[in-house]
Amino acid sequence: MGRQQWKKIWVGSAGNMVEWFDWFVYASFATYFAGSFFPSGNPTAQLMNTAGIFAVGFFMRPVGGWLLGRVGDRKGRKAALTLTVSLMSASAVLIAIAPTYGVAGYGGAAVLLVARLLQGLSVGGEYAASATYLTEASDADRRGFASSFQYVSMTAGQLLGLGLQIVLQRTMSDDTLHTGAGASRSSSAPSARPSSSTSAATCWRPRSTPSPPRTASSGPTTRAR
């Protein structure tokens, strides 16, 4: 295989790796942002709702493969791959700017759902387009080897997402990783105020009221002789 063919394989594999990195990183970090989009009180329900939105993306993958496959046939593989990367980038931006439950209620979860639908559409189109591109870009006797990079890059994207999670877990605290840490601290602030005010009241005591001056009647009685 020549240098030009290796370049095409790298271009096709790099885009596929980024696509699957964005796809898997949602599942990897779901435990950290689940509390931001659903009501607090039941962490298990929060995680299940977030996983449900993750599952919805799988329904769009066959649609993306069919739709973007037609785009690749009519406009070329490059146009199809560019469109898949653009859709994945747009979905990542939507997830980043989605409002939390405390700000917009279930509106944030709706934005998250739309983002996952776009990701499913993008990944489905990328899977078919990248495999076709890698096959067409190689020699007839090396097509099996070249197309294998489609799966290699997919696994590399998953490992890259897991590696990023491990690095962040090693370098950041658990409260910092949870996007709802700020909200939980705010909710716990009122319970902390009484203790601080109590300690302040303990340290500060009002000055005692001076006793009234003694009068003749209040003085000690003289003992009779």
Image (cartoon, rainbow, N blue to C red):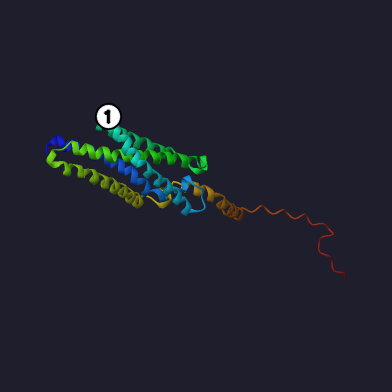
Q: Position of residue 194 (x, y in %)?
A: 59, 53
Q: Position of residue 166 (x, y in %)?
A: 32, 51
* Quadrant of res 211: bottom right
Q: Is residue 94 above or below residue 197?
A: above
Q: Is residue 165 above or below residue 73?
A: below
Q: Residue at x 50, y 53 (%)?
A: 42
The answer to whether residue 85 of the structure is visible from this angle is: no
Q: Is residue 102 above or below residue 67?
A: below
Number of callouts: 1
Q: Quadrant of the C terminus?
A: bottom right
Q: Position of residue 110 (x, y in %)?
A: 47, 40
The answer to whether residue 102 of the structure is visible from this angle is: yes
Q: Would you name the residue on which mark 1 appears?
A: 74
130 relative position to 214: left or right: left
Q: Secondary structure at mark 1?
A: helix
Q: Nearer the viewer, residue 12 or 56?
A: 56
